[in-house]
Amino acid sequence: MMIERFISSYLPATPAPCKYDVYFDTASALRTAAASAEWTDEVHQAMQFLSKRVEISKHLYESYHENGTKASTTLLAGELQPLALTLLFKDFCRLADDGKTACAVKRLNAVLKLLDSLASGNIPVEPTLVNLIDVEAERFLTRLPHADTPPSKTLANTQAPVNAGTLPITVLFWEGPIARAYLATLKSMGLKPEKIIHLISKNDLVSRKPIGRFLPGSLKLAYAHSRQKNSIHYWSTTIRKTESSLYQSIRNTVSDKLGFADRDIDEALALCDLSDYSLDVETLMIENLADSALYERLLELAQTQLLFTGGGIVPKRLLEITTLKFIHLHPGHLPEVRGADCVLWSYLMKGRTSATCFYMAPGIDDGDVILASYLPSLTPNLEVASMDVRTLYRATYAFLDPWVRSYVLRQALIETAGFTQVVACPQTEDTSVTYHFMHDRIKRIALAQLFAEPLPH
């Protein structure tokens, strides 16, 4: 078998000493897999562990802790990297042959990311192996079974079934298309959150350097807010100007298929002052969500529910504040579609977009589900063959993803009487699949399906 020949050629003649003081010794795991004619469960688990590491970081390190964090800052030796690539590719082929599509596509995601990493690091890989990976990846992706998950029930009245007035929640507002779509949705339903806490970053979002260090307090706040707003909305503003047909197509889809009026979409794009949405708006400058200032402020809040709108991973200690419940909208049907890029993974693996409203808990998209829903068909039917994947990807997350989430937010508000009558259900772990950021090659297939138009290689 060709793969076995590559494994033999990449296996070093002299193995490095085993590391007994770490949970996972990458070189040792690779040698065990390479030397095994029949893989044991332990080898399969090692491949899964390494695949996840590559999906997350795009690299492999010498050793890892049990929780997956790297135990060494040293990358895996260059001579072992092609061996890791070949073994992960072998595992992908096994999973694909066994019909384990979700596992196979995740393994392929790792293979493609590691292949890119080797190329950027000038680590040579035999052209024959690269060609084999290329051929098998294309064959697998073009033959992916197109699922047709039925949409969840739709609500006849989406405009004002909740009593208009003050909504007993606090919005933890992080500037961006998602937060703006949420506020526009609430406004369209005649609802005002009882409080908005506006989080403003002390640091530039690109350079990570402190903003306005020598400015007085009020000017520093205004300047930091302006920088944050311009940075976060850069691509949405640019795409509306340079790719108007793409923007308009997605906008029409949001309006026609998800039932959001043009005024709702315009409201989100207007970037209005937050006082338009709540009588109580408080501003808080923070380094990030782990900032002690945020923790201490949230501790002072009376018992309430917080609508989380973004800004990073919520630290465990915030989620453990007993007087608070964090509500999050995830663009995937939990627990079947967890993780990142899920507006695309959901479409690729389930045949339609989906979203879930749930109470956050420590972990990736963990927590009790308030409402999970598969959405109506959203296909914009736009000719996108001449557009590059990155533009389509940015447009999807600027103009479609926020409204996918908002659709389920609106449903959840209706079905729980504004989060006052919530019956949340625990997730079933046996159906859980966690996805990671997509490699561009898989994005190309997912976006082609989403826009119903083949994309160029």
Image: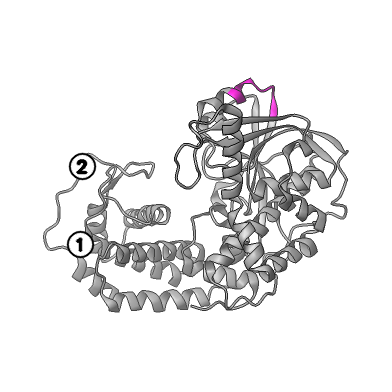
Helix, strand or loop at label 2? It is: loop
Q: How crowded is mark 2: few (under 14 residues within 10 Å), some or many (20 or more)?
A: few
| Image coords of residue 152 (percent x, y) | 74, 58
**What amino acid type is highlighted by mark number 2?**
Tyr
Q: At 54% across and 50% down in the image, what residue appears?
A: 430
Q: At 45% across and 42% down in the image, what residue appears?
A: 208
Q: Which of marks 1 and 2 is in front?
A: 1
Magenta region, residue range: 297-304
* Residue linked to disc 1: 79
Q: Residues within 10 Å of mark 1 (few under 14, many from 20)?
A: few
* Residue linked to disc 2: 20
Q: Is residue 182 above or below residue 11?
A: above
Is 300 included in the stretch rendered in magenta?
yes
Residue found at the very far left of the displayed protein: 14
Q: Nearer the viewer, residue 419 or 180?
A: 180
**What amino acid type is highlighted by mark number 1?**
Glu
Q: In this view, does 262 lie to the left or right of 207?
A: right
Is 262 included in the stretch rendered in magenta?
no
Q: At 26% across and 71% down in the image, what residue appears?
A: 125
